[in-house]
Amino acid sequence: MADDALRIAIVGAESTGKTALAQALAQRIALLTGQRCTWVGEHLRAWCDGHGRTPRPDEQPAIAAAQQALIDTAASGHDVVVCDTTPLMTAVYSDWLFNDTSLQARAVAWQRLCHITLLTALDITWQPDGLQRDGPQVRMPVDSRVRSLLIGHALPWALVAGQGDARLESAVDAVAPLLRARGGPAAGLFSRLALRDAAQPAWRWACDSCDAPECEHALLRLRQRLGTGPAAE
């Protein structure tokens, strides 16, 4: 990676607010830090709009490569880049839809270039959105696959949850230590981030399915007992 940009990846199942969060987080970071911050949208959305369909299995590698190129280009001219999805999600959907795991190794290797990955929780209502949405029933299995890759490959990640503004604040909390460590033109504003970070409760590991037991663990266990959770795939 030739650039020195801070890369913040946002991944997650469909209709979990990734695009809105990416835009809002980029704006907030720019305001807090004064650094050159941008966000990169999802290439797949433009691809589906342009082709009037979803991609075939053989078209998945090119879509992943195009997403990577968009992020790399943005990183070459900015201090911070917020990524609305990454090649990791293309690999996840290739597995889910086509039983093809061939994209995973390269996607995981590229994901390591991201300083943190934010996983959007399944705590907001599913909404239809054209060709890209398969339905609420795919969110749990996709979420499970994303978690498996993040945890299995020891990638740095944090869960982002909450309704409305609380979701953005959750994301700011997660990236605050990285922003504070970098400083910047408006470094005096990092006192806010330091206070925010210090106010967070001590993190503790709970299980292999959830990194935020206070908001997800009970729900996951309930869904597993009902036969709808990750263990029931």
Image (cartoon, rainbow, N blue to C red):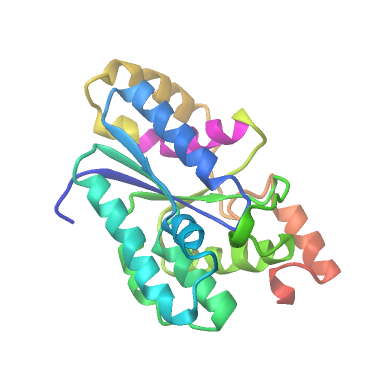
Which of 12/134 is in front? Answer: 134
Res. 217 in view = yes
Q: Residue at x 74, y 75 (%)?
A: 232
Measuring from the top left, give residue 132's x and y in whole percent. 58, 60
- Along the horizontal axis of the image, is 123 left or right of 37? right
Which of 30/74 is in front? Answer: 74
Measuring from the top left, give residue 104's x and y in whole percent. 41, 75
In which quadrant is the N terminus drawn? bottom left
Which of 207/102 is in front? Answer: 102
Res. 208 in view = no
Q: Which residue, as the protein is rendered here, is positioned at the far left?
A: 2
User: Does 49 lie within the magenta span?
Assistant: no
Image: 178 above or below 73 = above
Q: Quadrant of residue 69?
A: bottom left
- Main secondary structure type of the part rendered in magenta: helix
Q: Which residues are magenta?
A: 166-178
- Along the horizontal axis of the image, is 50 left or right of 179? right
